[in-house]
Image: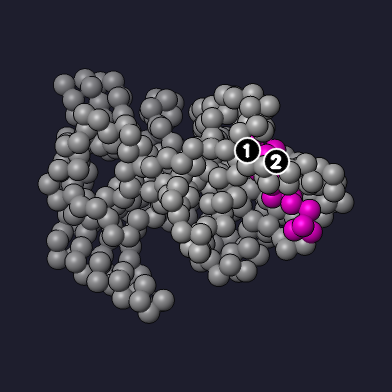
Amino acid sequence: MKFFKIIENNNFLQEWEKKANHPLQSWYWGKAREETGLEVLRIGEFEDDKLENVFQMTIHKTPFLPIKLGYLPRSRLPSKKALDFLAQTGRKKNLAFIKLEPYVKRSDISGNEDFFKSKNLKKSPHPLFTKWTILLDLRKSEEELLANMKNKTRYNIRLAKRKGIVVKLMDNEQGFKIFSKLYFDTCKRQNYKGHTPEYHRIIWQTLKGKTAHILIAFYKNEPLAAYEVFLYKDTLYYPYGGSSLKYRNFMPTNLLMWETILFGKRQGAEIFDMWGSLPPDYDQSHPWAGFTRFKQGYGGEFTEFIGAWDLIIDKRKYRLFSLLFTLRNILNL
């Protein structure tokens, strides 16, 4: 018999990790989010007494209204029964809605089209993840990977090597400090409102030695670019990166990305998920065109996911939240 329940202790930790499909669904990601002050709900889907599937949801308060919402990032596609349990849980927690962003490719929904017809489920007008990403097959040889790159990308990698750029794996406190500075310098330069330094410290402290790794490109011992990547099961993910304006003509980020790819191969990863892009026919004047073009240079495949969906629990609160969100964007608050 199939049933769902909220898991409230770590007795299922090992079984959970076997079933989790993405680093944002991992037990330790949930632990990190708890450390940042969020309420985390771990929902197990059981067949008889065997854990078959997992859904990890965080509870968020809105800054200007007495409204709470749930967020379920990068899970498997919830079944109708799972959606019913999520809605039931949402009502108990007085949520306005639950945002779902399944890690499910558009090409993989055959036979699951009923998900999109579910009651009280609508396409989200405010997704957190891009609908598209670029996936690179790491099962190919180094020679094949290089051959599939854009000519300019391949040239820039070789240029960086000639100029003396060196990439180091630095999974330690020094590495995190270097990464953090480069990351927040980049956020400030690009006027990007990312997470706080404390958030990133908690994520690093919780996931280091498990999922998170830091790679840094140097020129004569000066750090020029840094990535924090997640290695989870057979996939490498690139969620965070930062760079300096110094020696940009030495192309340190190109070599850093290539060495990150090689790191993933050495660790046995089969896929490199570059964590978001524009669609393949993107507008070259779009603000994201630069990083999409950069990622595209490595020869990966544009891949479309099913996007973000809102499971509405309280229609009145949901409309109020949507109005506030729209006004916030208009006023750039």
Task: Decide: few, some or many residues near mark 1? Use Cα within 10 Å; few <14, some 14-19, many ≥20.
Answer: some
Q: Earlier in the sequence, mark 2 or mark 1?
A: 1
Place residue 166 in its image quadrant: top right
Side of 159 where 61 appears, left or right: left
Colour scheme employed for the rendering of this structure: one colour
Q: Amino acid at mark 2?
A: Arg
Task: Decide: few, some or many residues near mark 2? Use Cα within 10 Å; few <14, some 14-19, many ≥20.
Answer: some
Q: Is residue 104 visible?
A: no
The residue pinned by badge 1 equals 149
Report x, y in % for residue 235. 51, 32
Q: Is residue 254 visible?
A: yes
Q: Amino acid at mark 1?
A: Met
Looking at the rendered structure, the secondary structure element under dot 2 is: helix
Q: Which residues are magenta?
A: 247-261
Side of 282 where 76 appears, left or right: left
Which residue shows up at 25% across the image and 37% down it? Answer: 78
Which residue shows up at 68% across the image and 27% down it? Answer: 143
The residue pinned by badge 2 equals 154
Q: Are marks 2 and 1 in contact (CB under 8 Å)?
A: yes
Looking at the rendered structure, the secondary structure element under dot 1 is: loop
Q: Residue furthest bottom?
A: 331
Please say whether residue 249 is one of the residues in the magenta stretch: yes
